[in-house]
Every structure is written in structure tokens, then in C-alpha cells.
Image: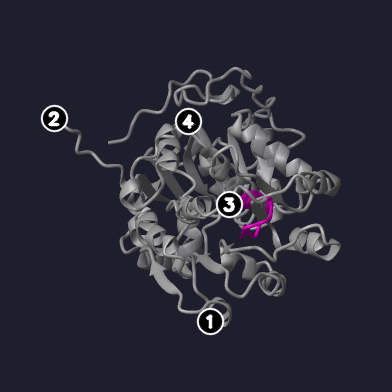
Amino acid sequence: MEDETVNGFTQLGIDGQLVSKLEKAGITEPTPVQEQVIPVLNRGENAVVQSQTGTGKTLAFVLPMLERIDTSSDEVQGLILAPTRELAVQITNDISSVQGSEIKTLAVYGGQDIEKQLHRLGRGAHLVVATPGRLLDHLRRGTIDLDRVRMLVLDEADQMLHMGFLNEVEDVITQTPADRQMMLFSATMPQEIRTLSKQYMKKAAHIKVDARRITVEEIEQVVVETTDRRKQASLRKMLDQHQPFLAIIFCRTKRRTAKLSDELKAFGYNADELHGDLSQAKREKVMKRFREMKVQFLVATDVAARGLDVEGVTHVYNYDIPHDTESYVHRIGRTGRAGKDGLAITFAAPKDRMHLEQIERGIGFPLKRISCEVNADEPLQADQKNSDRKREPGRPSSRNQSRGNRNQKPSNRRNKEHSPRKKRH
């Protein structure tokens, strides 16, 4: 009897070789954004897509782009603009996981050795993934030519606007052919983004993926009611109770991120920080250690964590509550990926009520409240000089630790005596 099972990507018109690579990566069924976007892009149409992170939007534009690359030419045919270095690297890694060996992809972003980039460009590149500033450096040097670009993607356009890249983005757009296909992806659609799309995109299809659907899939969400004074002690208690495999802890500012990371380390937690004040070399080192599970708790700002897709993140902690639904969805989307379960915990003081209610209206349902009683003897903050609770940070996990074993956690002195987190029901 003939097998009637048809891969969902085949039905969307994706080439068999690409489908095979997706299957090897364990990806067999398209997400809602992929189902809606891929047919539009395959027809060569422009598209404005409102979609949160964690929806699979990267493959939604990458797969159609890979199918249209002419490998007989070494000219740049596809350009993807991203707001941060981390997102540019992540997109490049996603492309590498499915592209054929004959397709050349290059990441171009600040903080890299520009001579190495020039050497790579000298060998040709079909797809370039870039941050606006460094790309403009190459354009001024004449080391990148966009005259043959047929496909242009602006990923997380609202974040590029927020970071002040609007003028740079427009400079790049004007150096691509007028008849190129353009794709704009954004979590929100402020007026500036709408104006940008109208000015540079003709007859664009408008696609929106409902954020409410995203937040309920595979992610358990709770609110810990606390006070500003007891928030850190509550966080530590939650970390001890949950025993995350890997966790990201979000703070509002760079200063709070650095301070919380230092204090967690003073209490013996295997933590490190990620924010915009770090050098690119330091940021890459931190992310490498986190991906290799040598760091268990990554304390980060929103911008620094933009586009992060790390296997094994089981928990997200909103130490500082986000001030809008889009940021909330972006943060919690770091867990519960690829069909795995995830837990998102938001700490809320009485003064955070307005923002909490705004988030609940945005996602369409109330979040479960839980209390966290902190022992009266528990220090509220680490005393760097005198705390008798201060201990050495956990030693790094073994380099041969398997990434696929979700029950084997990064080494941490605080969790050596605990068994792995039980599956929630």
C-alpha cells in the first residue's frame, strides 16, 4: 500500500532537497507563519509580516530565498538585515543548517575583524546576513555590491527602529534594485514601520500571526507576587525549587543586569551577564559558554537577547516585568521551543499591576498567581564582603556533556544534591 503521508513543506512547494534537510533536523510540519508566508514569497510577492519571535519566522523567509539562489554566480543575491549581532549570527546558523554546500552565506556585523570579512567576501557570497552599521561600512568601502540583490529581508524591523537604525536601513534599501522582492518582519507595526513599507514596497501582502496563540503553546506561565525588596530572594528560591536545565533571567537595564548577575554569582549560582555594554568578543564568549551549558543562568537585557535560540532553555524569568505584550511574548518565546515544554515566571510587585494587566489583556487570558514565601533568615541580597552564605560559583560542566540530554544539568554547587525537575502536569 502506498504511503499517503506528505510532508507539510512539500505541500507548500519547498524543494525535495530542502525538505530532506529539514527532516534530518527534525522539522516536518510548518508553523502557522510558515504556512502563510512561504506561498506568498514563492510567488515573488512583497510581504509585510507581523509575527512574534518563536513562531518559526526565520525559515519562513529563508526557505524561499534558498530556492531562488543561482549558484553559478558568486554575486550577492539575497540580503537579510537584522538589528543585533546575536540575531545576525542566529539567522546565519539557521541558514547553515538547511542550505546546500554550494550556497555561500556570510554574516557581516560589527565587532568582527573586518579583514577576515574582506577575505570571505573575496570568495563570493550568495546570501549576506548583516547589521545595518557594518553593512554600510562595506558599502562605503566598495567591498559589497548590492546591484544584483533580488531578495531583501528586514527582520525585526521595529527593533531596528527602536535602536535608531531607520536612516541606515533606508540607505541600504536605496542601494538595492527597485524591482527586488522585499520582506519586512516585525513584532509590532508602529507608524514609522507602516510608512517605511508603503514607501519601498509595492502591492505587499499583509500577514499577521496572532500573539495569543503563541503564548499558550508549550509554555506554562505564572506570576510570582512579591515586593521589590524581596524580589531577589524570591528569584533564588524559585531557581532552587525549579532546578532549570538552562534559564534566561530578563532585567530592564544594563546596570540591573550586571548587578543581579554579580549577586547571583556571590550566592554560588552559575550565572553570567549579557548586555550591550559588553564588547562583542565578550558577548560571543558568554553565548558560547551558555550554548555549551557551561553557564546555567544567563542574566540579560531584551536587546542583547534578541533572536537568541538556544537548545535546552527550560525556564524564563522576568525579573523585571516587561512593559508591553510584545516584549513579554518575545521573552517567554526563548523557552518552549521545538515542541519542548517551558516555564515562564514573571515577578510582579504591587507597582507593576498596570503592566501586568496590560500583558493579560494582550495575550487574552489571566496569568496564574503564585506566592513565594521567603524565609526570614534568608538574606535579601548578597553581602560581597561579609555574607556567610557566599560560596564559590559552580564549576563548569564537562566539555563532553551531551547537548541532547536534558536531564543532565550544567554543574552548579547549589543543585548537586537535587534530582532533575519533574515534568509538570
CA distance separating discs 4 and 3: 49 Å
Q: Which residues fall within the magenta stretch?
A: 74-88
Q: How is the image coloured?
A: one colour
Q: Which mark is residue 198?
A: 1
Of labels 4 and 1, the one closer to you: 1
Residue linked to disc 4: 243
Q: Quadrant of residue 420?
A: top left
- What residue appears at the point 30 percent right and 42 percent down from the top-left corner? 7
Three-letter code for the amino acid on which mark 3 is drawn: Asp
Count neighbours of disc 3 (C-alpha within 10 A) and say few if under 14, some if 14 to 19, many if 20 or more. Answer: some
Instruction: Return the disc, 4 or 1, that comes first in the chain's sequence.
Output: 1
In which quadrant of the rendered image does the N terminus lie? top left
Question: Is residue 383 visible from the viewing direction of this image?
Answer: no
Type of amino acid at the residue the image marks with label 4: Gln
The residue that label 3 is drawn on is 70
Can you name the residue that lies furthest to the front here?
A: 72
Q: Nearer the viewer, residue 116 or 77?
A: 77
The x and y percentages for residue 375 are 49, 37
| CB-based contact (under 8 Å), mark 4 and mark 3 | no
